[in-house]
Image (spheres, grey):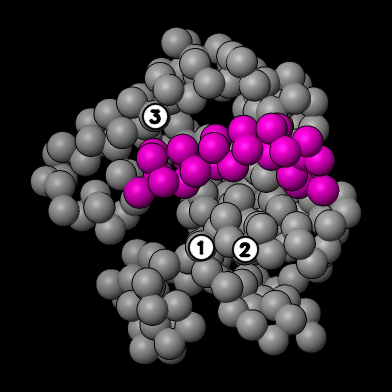
Amino acid sequence: GQPILYSYFRSSCSWRVRIALALKGIDYETVPINLIKDGGQQFSKDFQALNPMKQVPALKIDGITIHQSLAIIEYLEETRPTPRLLPQDPKKRASVRMISDLIAGGIQPLQNLSVLKQVEEELQLTWAQNAIISGFNALEQILQSTAGTYCVGDEVSCPQVFLYYRFKVDCTPYPTISSINKRLLVLEAFQVTHPCRQPDTPTELRA
């Protein structure tokens, strides 16, 4: 059967997987998991059985269920190698993985919903911005030596989706990040998977 993606329109981890699926031309069904409604649908017994970490995305594919966006993307790359999302050159591959880990492990968890809930409400925006700025300072520096048209050279690799829209981070100090982001956002795979165009996107946020 068709792969099933458990996704939330605004989750950047889910978006990363949606982009990979789109780039590889894989049709899939979306099951929306609303992280806010009903106290968070990710905490339901059914979803917890699917992903004990109670997070999106989760992908049912080839008779297995995979969670963690980078693990999902690596699986898609290994089982459906064209078009490729990892460069052939091992050094460039290492750069792609380094940048992906920096975003997925070094920036994202600090501004995730579950972490923000631990911070007083009036401090949440500042907390999220500080996490992103700290990561972007490092990322900008790294990209200056790895970037071509995109993050690593001139091929769209293991998609790096940037996070500054929601938290109003000023991107003036990050010209490399900003220019790569602009080039990515015009690609069809990024447009059709955009948070403002998902089955669960609220009407007022659709574009």
Magenta range: 84-109
The reply to whether discs 1 and 2 touch (Cβ–Cβ < 8 Å) is: yes
Q: Nearer the viewer, residue 49 or 195?
A: 49
**From this viewpoint, which residue is outermost toward the left?**
120
Q: Residues within 10 Å of mark 1 (few under 14, many from 20)?
A: some
Q: Is residue 140 magenta?
A: no
Q: Residue at x 40, y 19 (%)?
A: 137
Quarter-of-image position of residue 99: top right
Q: Which residue is mark 1?
A: 68
Q: Residue at x 74, y 71 (%)?
A: 28
Residue 120: image x %, image y %?
Answer: 11, 46
Q: Which residue is mark 3?
A: 135
**Residue 185 visible in the shown view:** no
Please tell me the numbered disc located at residue 130: none
Residue 23: image x %, image y %?
Answer: 80, 50
Predominant secondary structure, magenta span: helix
- Indicate whether 134 appears above or below 124: above
- Indicate whether 6 appears above or below 132: below
For label 3, the SS is: helix
Say which label, 3 or 1, has the lower sequence index: 1
Quarter-of-image position of residue 173: top left
Q: Is residue 92 magenta?
A: yes
Amino acid type of the residue that numbered disc 1 sits on in the rendered structure: Gln
Amino acid type of the residue that numbered disc 2 sits on in the rendered structure: Ile
Q: Nearer the viewer, residue 20 or 30?
A: 20
Q: Nearer the viewer, residue 104 or 1?
A: 104
Residue 151: image x %, image y %?
Answer: 66, 28
Residue 88: image x %, image y %?
Answer: 81, 40
The reply to whether discs 3 and 1 touch (Cβ–Cβ < 8 Å) is: no
Please tell me the numbered disc located at residue 72: 2
